[in-house]
Image (cartoon, rainbow, N blue to C red):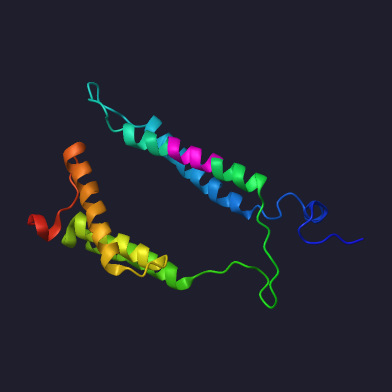
Amino acid sequence: MSASPGTATAREDQGFWHGRAGLVVPGIVAAFSTYLLVGVLTMEVPDGTDFPGPRFFPTILIVAGYLIALLLAVHYLRHPEPPEETGDRPHRTFTDWQAVAWCVGGFLVFAVTIEILGWILAAGLLFWCVARGIGSLRPLFDISLALLFSSLVYLAFSQGLGLNLPSGFLGGF
């Protein structure tokens, strides 16, 4: 007797890893968090450094990274997502190369123009490209939101942390 594709018997026949390819993502997030952890632990911090110090924000990222990796791993272990057979295509997933081009292209433009445009404009452009890449069709709203958030990040880093982000031609280079 053959089991239908959605039954427990069919999953047992295909092995534990069937439908759990998503575990790669929490593995990458955990590896990146471990890389940050090693960096924080080996960081030399001068005596008398005021709070929050150079370890504070990386530590927040490390904790968030491990938490996200754990939650994703639990999700994929509890709810495997096996690929569905759909006619002539063997799997339900595909790569949206147009979205990839928008996101990667936006990052490349950001990296090349950050010194000229400055953080606010370059990060705003990056945000807009990513929003466009993931399917947003409201360019005026997206660029407005992008400029707002990039300005807030600029203020947080410059005023809150005392770090200098490139100001570009808006700040006279």
Q: Which residues are magenta?
A: 63-70
Q: Is residue 30 or residue 46 the one in the foreground?
A: 30
87 to 163, vertically: above or below: below
Would residue 122 appear left or right of 169 to someone viewing this image? right
Q: Where is residue 89 drawn, in percent x and y?
A: 66, 75
Split into 4 quadrants, where in the image is the C terminus?
bottom left
Predominant SS of the magenta segment: helix
Would residue 132 appear left or right of 88 to someone viewing this image? left
> Is there any visible trace of residue 117 in the rendered image?
yes
Q: How many marks?
A: 0
84 to 19, vertically: above or below: below
In magenta stretch: residue 67: yes
> Is there any visible trace of residue 173 in the rendered image?
no
Q: Where is residue 18 drawn, in percent x and y?
A: 71, 55
Name the outermost residue toward the bottom: 88
Would residue 172 appear left or right of 116 to someone viewing this image? left
Name the outermost residue toward the top: 48
In magenta stretch: residue 95: no
Q: Where is residue 17 drawn, in percent x and y?
A: 70, 51
Q: Which residue is painted at 42% across and 65% down in the image? A: 134
Q: Which residue is painted at 11% across and 60% down in the image? A: 169
Name the outermost residue toward the left: 172
Would residue 108 appear left or right of 134 to someone viewing this image? left
Q: Which residue is painted at 27% across and 58% down in the image? A: 146
Q: Which residue is painted at 36% across and 70% down in the image? A: 137
Q: Where is residue 27 drawn, in percent x and y?
A: 55, 46
Split into 4 quadrants, where in the image is the N terminus?
bottom right
